[in-house]
Amino acid sequence: MKKLQDQHFAVTGVATGIGAELARQLLASGARVTGFDVATPEGAAFPCHRVDLADLASIKPLVEQAQGPFTGLCNNAGLSPRPGREALILTVNFFAQRAFTQAMLPKLASGASIVNMASRAGARWRDNIGQIKRLFAIDPVKDIESFIRDEKIDHVRAYNLSKEAMIVWSIAETEAMTARHMRINALCPAAVATGLLDDFAKAFGEQMAKNIARAGRPGQPEEIAAIARFLLSPASSWLRGAEISPDGGMGAFAISDSLDLSGLRL
């Protein structure tokens, strides 16, 4: 049975990885998909708009061209942590997702679900809430370079901060979205086997390798996409403002290590 028949979902970053797999699963469930990406997916069975999320001014006019209404939005697009592109990381991974969602709001139907693709790299947002609030306060066009310089942000911190901001934004918007009869949640995977995994291995080094070894393997795009599909569906209607971490146990490993919980095992 196609449980998402007559539903219509917008997915950013749809050309590869988790986004491509999510589109495939949504279509297989009977839904319609409209994609948004800087590249056009090869052989796509759905309409896809080309968008460069680094160009914030281009987002609203492009979204206005999309044929709604939509019953869900997955903000999946993002850049991995590479040296020298700190401003791009913060722009694409956070500011563009927020601008895209704001532009999409008039096209989202009552009951719509928004899924923000964050990361386990954003798990320490509580420790960094001051810096996150300062990020929210800047003009992303005029102030981002000075913010990066003043805050001494390298590519790894830019990535982590962008994902912390996605989580905090999801939480902050929950009550307002509830009043609109919509939902918003943050999906926070770790170490997923996409074409970007090598970038993460270089950025996070030995710790990431240890985490994957302890988990037994990296996550797979289809596993994360299945959770995103659930969050977009009416079956998850009581999940609002949640921080959901499909990470193979890596978060639990870190908590157990920091609190020395090994003595409590069976």
Image (tube, rainbow, N blue to C red):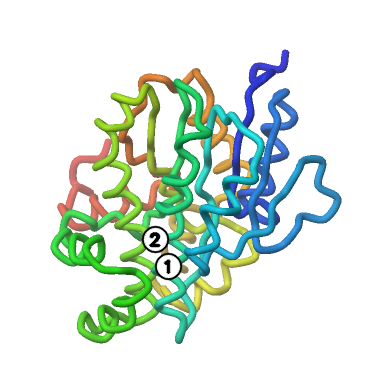
Q: Are marks 2 and 1 in contact (CB under 8 Å)?
A: yes
- Expressed as whole percent of the image width and height from the top left, the position of residue 90 reads 39, 69
Q: Amino acid at mark 1?
A: Thr
Circle 1 residues within 10 Å: few <14, some 14–19, many ≥20: many
| Image quadrant where one finds the C terminus | top left
Q: Which residue is mark 1?
A: 91
Quick one: SS at disc 1? helix
- Expressed as whole percent of the image width and height from the top left, the position of residue 215 reads 46, 52
On screen, residue 166 above or below 22: below
**Image side of residue 31 versus residue 245, left or right:** right
State the image quarter where residue 161 is shown: bottom left
On screen, residue 2 above or below 255: above
- Expressed as whole percent of the image width and height from the top left, the position of residue 172 reads 24, 42
Quick one: SS at disc 2? helix
What is the residue that sits farthest to the top in this orientation?
A: 1
Residue located 58% across and 35% down the image: 226
Q: Amino acid at mark 2?
A: Phe
| Image quadrant where one finds the N terminus | top right
**Image side of residue 5 versus residue 178, left or right:** right
Residue located 47% across and 27% down the image: 112
Report the Cα–Cα distance between label 2 and label 1. 5 Å
Q: Which residue is mark 2?
A: 95
State the image quarter where residue 198 is shown: bottom right
Circle 2 residues within 10 Å: few <14, some 14–19, many ≥20: many
- Expressed as whole percent of the image width and height from the top left, the position of residue 57 reads 49, 64
